Image: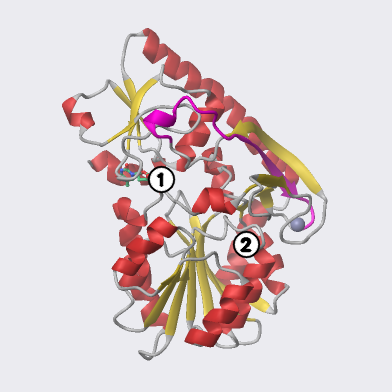
Amino acid sequence: MEINKKYHLRKTCRICGKENLAKVLDLGEMPPANSFIKKEDLDLPEDKFPLVVYFCRDCSLLQVLDIVNPNILFQDYDYLTSASKPLAFHFVEMAHLLKKQFIVSEDELMIEIGGNDGTLLEAAKNECRVLNIDPAANIAKISKEKGIPTINEFFTEEIAKDVLAKFGSAKVIVANNVMAHIDDLHDVFRGIKLLIGKSGTFVFEVHWVGNLVTEGGFDQIYHEHLCYHSLLALQNLVSQFSLQIFDIETVPIHGESMRVFVGDKDMFPVTERVKAFTEREKKLGLDHEETFFEFANRVEGNKKELVSLLSQIKKDGKRICGYGAPAKGNTLLNYFGIGSDVLDFLTDTTPMKQGLFSPGMHIPVLTPDVLEKDPPNYILLLAWNYAEAILKK
Ligand code: TMP
Ligand code: ZN
């Protein structure tokens, strides 16, 4: 993408390259979901871009074709892994599992693409060489300060060539909550193939489209999320690079996410779990457009229900706030038209979001201690994926 172009519309499916696309859900013009606003900038015009979801009838990938320049979305990033304790804990656990399963000697290399503040690699760095490749300058700085070698770039085939020359090949590449963000998946997979060679493994976690569809969690849709992955669509992608998905499990992150294991097509035996998961997806109809039209209808029903509930509470003279200021909360608030006349404020544990205002709806984001000092009557849980941990608090 040209460096100074803010937005462009893609015409083809990013896995199979065809144009056999069905329009599923049109969310209208939306501000980027993590573009929180400073108080002094509230009167400035805000960038808004179309947000429309398509289903590919050929390879089954659900995707957004509206591409906001990744430099706008990711270079100065407000999302910090360590701000969500359950997520940080999950990644530390994953680091231990990966070491156990794949790392046999200290000189082997573990690379993380989009490793954010280094939460996962920090837990691996005493037992192997590690390398974080993350495009966010403010976040890469935190990772470096933890003593993790960090390249502040988007991962591409070009970067992979450099890394191969300087660090050698990788035993494991990890990429969590990154595969949904990538427009040029082919370029990234060429880079991965280069770095893992015959014997390395690529492991990634990504939100599962089956969860989105069954739970109606349309709020996961925002410009950062270009793809809503299924195993069916991913198999089509990896096979184009002589790779295969040899194992899969699900993890309770963002509702339900897939943890996918990819390796050379001839090197790893494929587990029964892969076949079983494929069957599960077919039963859910994830390879049929009708499934996604039904999902879109449910979103409209949920909109009516939530908006009328909130307006009843307001009529009763009660105060409501939102818990969490996650990106997905901004999709929900903007699409449902829930503004500061309904929610007095949002709270969030991310220091970088505190004191700012939510994109589009301009609701102030405060520190969570306000809930004790000045408790509202109702709290709308926007960070619903952490319901258990948050309800305990
Ligand atoms: P995510 O759903 O995209 O991971 O974002 C979750 C947001 O919720 C993130 O901004 C941090 C915030 N959060 C809280 O404010 N309190 C909490 O207890 C947790 C777990 C997250
Ligand atoms: Zn396709």
Of the residues under marks 2 and 1, which one precedes in the sequence? 2
Q: Residue furthest left?
A: 373
367 to the left or right of 51: left
351 to the left or right of 256: left
Find residue 60 and report its horizontal and vertical position in percent: 72, 54
Indicate whether residue 371 is drawn in magenta.
no
* Closest to the observer, 155 or 17: 155
For disc 1, the marked residue is 385
- CA gap between label 2 and label 1 equals 21 Å
For disc 2, the marked residue is 231
Residue at x-position 47% and y-position 26%: 361
Disc 1 packing (10 Å; few <14; some 14–19; many ≥20): some
386 to the left or right of 2: left
Ligand 1 image-quadrant field: top left
Find residue 311 and report its horizontal and vertical position in percent: 44, 14
Stretch in magenta: 37-58
In which quadrant of the rendered view does residue 187 lie?
bottom right
Find residue 346 and report its horizontal and vertical position in percent: 34, 31
Q: Is residue 106 visible?
A: yes
State the mark number for residue 159: none
In which quadrant of the rendered view does residue 340 lie?
top left
Residue at x-position 41% and y-position 48%: 78
